[in-house]
Image (spheres, grey):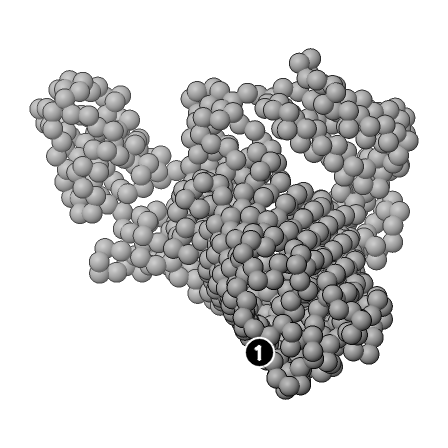
Amino acid sequence: MKYFVIILLTLKFAFSNAFADIINNIEVKNNNRITKETIITFGGIELGKDYNQEKLNQILLDLYSTNFFSDIKFDVQGDVLVVEVEERKIIQQIILNGVKAEKTKKSILKNLSLREKSPYVGFLAKQDIAKIENSLNSAGYYFNKVDVTLKSNNNDTVDIIYNIDLGDKALIKNIIFTGEKYYKDKKLKNIIVSEESKFWKIISNKKYLNPNQIDLDLRLLEKFYLNKGFYNVQIQNSSAIFNDNHFNLIYNIDAGNIYTIRNTKLILPDDFNEKDFKEVKNILKKLKDEKYSLIKLNKVVKQIDQISVSRLYDFIDATIETQIINDNKLDITFVVKESEKFYVKKINVKGNNITEERVIRDMLEVDEGDPFNRLLHAKSLNNLKARGIFQEVKSEIVDTQDGNLKNIDITVEEKATGEILVGAGVGTEGGTAQFSVSENNFLGKGVKLSTGLRMSETRLRGNFTITNPNFNYSDKALFTDIFITDTDKLTDSGYESTNAGFSLGTAFEQYDDFFFRPTFTTTYEDLITNSSASENLKKQKGTYFTTELGYTLDLDKRNQRFQTSDGFQSKFTQKIPLISESNTLINGYQFDTYHSFENLTSSLGLYLKAATGLSDDVRISERINLPRKRLRGFESGRIGPVDANDHVGGNYAASLNFQTNLPFLFSSFQSVDFNYFFDAGNVWGVDYSNSVGDSSHIRSSTGVGLEWFSPIGPFTFTLAQPISKVDTDRTQSFQFNIGTTF
């Protein structure tokens, strides 16, 4: 209101004097920080132009809208416009008294209208009080009190001081479900995020009343019932003060009837080829007589979208129309329409203080001037999220004056990209340790640098890797890896091996989600033996120089790279010797598939690898072992063929892996994933197997794993128990990794 009154009074008295039709000059008074040129620019003033009172009024409004001025006066003297201003003070600091947690401070400051180094506007400061109160309410501080004071500094700046009394957090005493709910309370409590306060839930934030959390609860409950066939479900929430800072959280559920699907139909635009959607029609046939399920219907829409993009149907919009036939029957129609056709005029990138704008733009699937495609736009956002250098990625489609042109505003929030990782494994006969340091956004160019060490009682491996995901902005990745491995088993098995080399490779998307990764590797190895070595090892004594070409064919249909819940990944690898003193061909294949149902996610994995000597026996350094994650509960490289009491690897390796999360365990802890796994596998076969202990016995293990995104960084823990093994195997029941960012 004050703002409006100032403008009216100014407009009333600003032009009491007559003024010339043409203004040839401007004079500015009382400006200390804002230059005359800046005022001309902000006001849109063009000297030598005709001006009437309406145009001058607009200049005044434009200058006020900058928030740099608390008062502006105009006076026209001949052909000179005299502008007298009163500048607003600049905010030097915003201080939050009473808040210690840095995370809470950042959350509050992020939502404020006023910023440090910006002009101070009194009414915005008062509005920010309400925003702070809402932020604290969302964090569970329902009983907070906030007031603001202003401190003037000598340099014409001010400090805004918000005095905050957090009060006690509002605890959820009981969660109550009423109405026709069909399911037990225990089941429904596992669906929602909010939880009852218990003495053992010390670090959980979900036990506090939070309106955002309650909104999420309502969506989760609704989604649960919709996927169970309850098409007309209605859910309401209320809360009641129990005593002091305790609340009862009440959800009233009217589930209604379970609906089944009577008929399905697909309606396409006239210019669409129905043969392209044959797969969709087959899916629709299977939906008949099944219970209504929103997740199944959305998968059909996703399939339609994917087909439309692959067949270059640029402007499409697939929607679901339902018709109630009776109390328990539905007809479902999928309508594919040609949606609003518009093109991308401009893409604005915001929030990148460190990351170069070009790095972000090159991760986008849609460019300026392209027709807008919502699927490619969604893939662009996923590309940005998957890079691992942003905390948050948002986008907004903005209208322009041109009807068929729109702007896209992409806003990123950068995060700390330096990582330190420490890990260890403890087994029955020793342990392993690892340490690594990486920077994932070197100089803001999206380049990853990493170095690490892995140690055991007999082996030390170090490496340094540089990865550029978009080398020279070519849409191709380039990486190089320098490595050295020293294996000292002179005492136990009579040999020592030093293996050093480097690799250079690239990677690019050949087709949709199909990647090709060729790699060139050169290696130098020195193998020495003593009298206690086996005859087989003595034959391999000497130095070797190897150059090989490798490649990977990768079809990646996972919905996301991290915490995958749907899709699959299929990879074939091959290493071909080029210049080598021992020619070994290595082939590998792995397949991992992921499936989710409600809040349960399971995965099944297959791993196969084989080494074949083309002209000689496979050298010990080229033999195969199962990766650590493919057979948990056993020390890596410590199963399979044994020569002179030492595990020497095999010509073949295979494993089968099953894993599922256990959402009902540790559900009270935020950012904690708990899972169960079963692994089975073996390493077998050497060229001289008649003289080497080689078992065809399948090894297997079971166990649990925990992933916790702690305040200091990610923490992973694995506890495994071998089920089947042989006497020569070395087990490793416990593994953990902990990291932090910088």
Nearer to us in this view, 278 or 132: 278
Residue at point 15%, 44% (across, down): 30
Q: Name the residue type under label 1.
A: Ile
Give the percent coordinates (x, y) of residue 157: 27, 56
Q: Is residue 657 visible?
A: yes
Give the percent coordinates (x, y) of residue 431: 66, 79
Q: Which residue is mark 1?
A: 528
Give the structural element (helix, strand or loop) at label 1: strand
Nearer to us in this view, 410 or 463: 463
Outermost left residue: 78
Compared across the picture, whether 20 is left or right of 595 comes to left
Q: Is residue 170 visible?
A: no
Nearer to us in this view, 478 or 399: 478
Outermost top residue: 270
> The N terminus is located in which quarter?
top left
Q: Vertically, is 229 above or below 723? A: above
